[in-house]
Image (cartoon, rainbow, N blue to C red):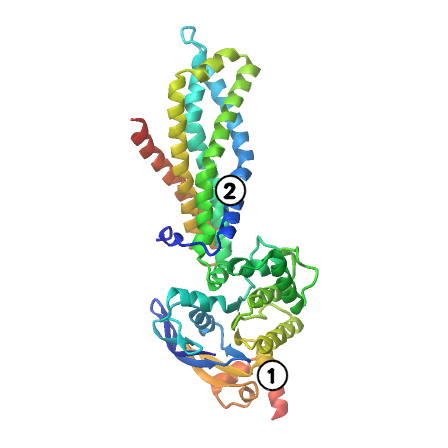
Amino acid sequence: MIEVKNIDKSFGDTQVLHDVSFKFERGKPNLVIGQSGSGKSVLIKCIVGLHTPEKGQILYDGVDFSAMKKKEKKKIRSQIGMLFQAGALFDSLSVIENVIFPLKMFTKMSRAEMLDRANFCLERVDIINKNNLFPSEISGGMQKRVAIARAIVMKPKYLFCDEPNSGLDPLTAILIDNLIKELTEEYNMTTVVITHDMNSVLEIGENIMFIYNGNNHWVGDKDSIITTPNKEVNDFVYSSKFLKLFKEKMN
Amino acid sequence: MMLLSMFTKPEKLSVYWTRLMEEMVQLGVKSLGIVILMSAFMGAVIVIQSATAIDAAWIPDYTVGFTAKQSIILEFSPTIMSLILAGKVGSNIASELGSMRVTEQIDALEIMGINTKAYLIRPKIIAAVLIFPVVIIFSMAFGFGGGWLAAFGTGLIPEDQYIVGIQTFYDDNLWMITYALIKTTVFAFIITSVSSYHGYYTSGGALEVGKSSTNAVVYSSVLILLANLLLTQLLLI
């Protein structure tokens, strides 16, 4: 489990996060939702240590990340898998080399063992016979899946996904969402997904935090989000015409 | 600060060794073609220009070879070639690192727990410092070769006189080459560290990657010229 307590983060005079607290539970996808610019990505970057918050605590299974020694931080980082918005695959490496990379850097596995593990992960995300292609030679959806394979290759305890289905068609987006959910349960990971896609919310939103102007404005799940009277959440959820029509029919 | 944070224990030595070898090929071996081509042509032009300029009966023919040697070893190969490498290698490094930054590849490495400066920049600097002197020796050799071809092809001076000119003050040649290689090593460090800095700290998008690349070349070139003046004063006077 990951817990953030009273996080504050500013860039210059702009306060992006203000007193954010939340518990990200193990074994289920935890969603951070909100409008663009609301501070979702900054929050995730604070949690993984790419940004340092001015105030507050980030607890990995009860241990404060900021109080950890360098070696302990390194250990936690080796247990983190991250899926970036654009995949962030290494351009100069082939698909298989991208997935092998963390194993190469942090394990003493033989080449054959690394290939076995990487192939297993690629098959798990349904990428077959693409090992020698480079990221630029595969589609956006495939890049995301390869990035997921790379994120899980070290069997992480924590998985972070920054807008995993941005730029994907609805069908591929649902595939990616379900894949994240399945892997979370399979590896019993603490998974944090940032999204502003309502399809994802309704598909895998078991524990949701809604960020509004840098605050955790609302907390709930995929069922309570469509019935909540909270105005800001309603504005966000029913911003799509389809959901607005759906709500009117339901009423 | 950037350079200091590079000096950490490598996560895995074998991976860093492979990176070093790759960078030596990328920065050095792949630059050989353009260096050889330019050096040969410049060597030829230097000989033709010197031969036509020193067209007096009382000046011995070997002076042309001597002039070519001085120009190639002291300035053309180490400095002009380094400026050309700043354009080729510097922009390559800055755009590579800049693209990695804006596409979050550097963030991905950092989250894995890798010291990105040590992993991405250190091999480039070490590789350039080791391989650029070799590239410059090739440049000198092909510069002389180009000069010889010009002497042979145009008949402006006899070939043997050209070779005598090259060999004149033989004892000084070793120091001149050492001086050139010292300069090259310093220039290699400037090109890779300045370009890496501009690439690594790129923020924004494709436009900023282009700007970083341009800045890398401009700053590297200016620093090379300043270092050239400084080193020449320190080593030759």
* Secondary structure state at the residue bearing disc 2: helix
In this view, which residue lies farthest toward the top?
A: B57
Above or below, B30 relative to B143: below
Q: Residue at x 48, y 45 (%)?
A: B91
Q: Mark 1 vs mark 2: give the one in front.
A: 2
Q: Residue A136: tell me if it is visible.
A: yes
Q: Quadrant of the C terminus of chain A?
A: bottom right
Query: Mark number for residue B24?
Result: 2
Q: Which mark is residue A113?
A: none
Q: Position of residue A231 (x, y in %)?
A: 48, 87
The answer to whether A92 appears left or right of B126 in the picture is right
Q: Are marks 1 and 2 on the same chain?
A: no
Q: Chain of mark 2?
A: B
Q: Mark 2: which amino acid?
A: Met
Disc 2 residue crowd, few under 14, some 14–19, many 20+, Cα 10 Å: many
Q: Tell me the element at label 1.
A: helix
* Chain for numbered disc 1: A
Q: Residue furthest bottom?
A: A251
Does residue B156 appear in this view? no
Q: Nearer the viewer, residue B213 or B65?
A: B65
The one nearer the camera, A94 or A237, is A94
Percent coordinates x, y for residue B99 in the rendering: 51, 54
Asked whether, in this view, residue A171 is left or right of residue A24, the answer is right
The image quarter containing residue B63 is top left
Which residue, as the protein is rendered here, is positioned at the far right? A129
Residue picked out by circle 1: A243
Q: Amino acid at mark 1?
A: Leu
Q: Quadrant of residue B86 in the image?
A: top left
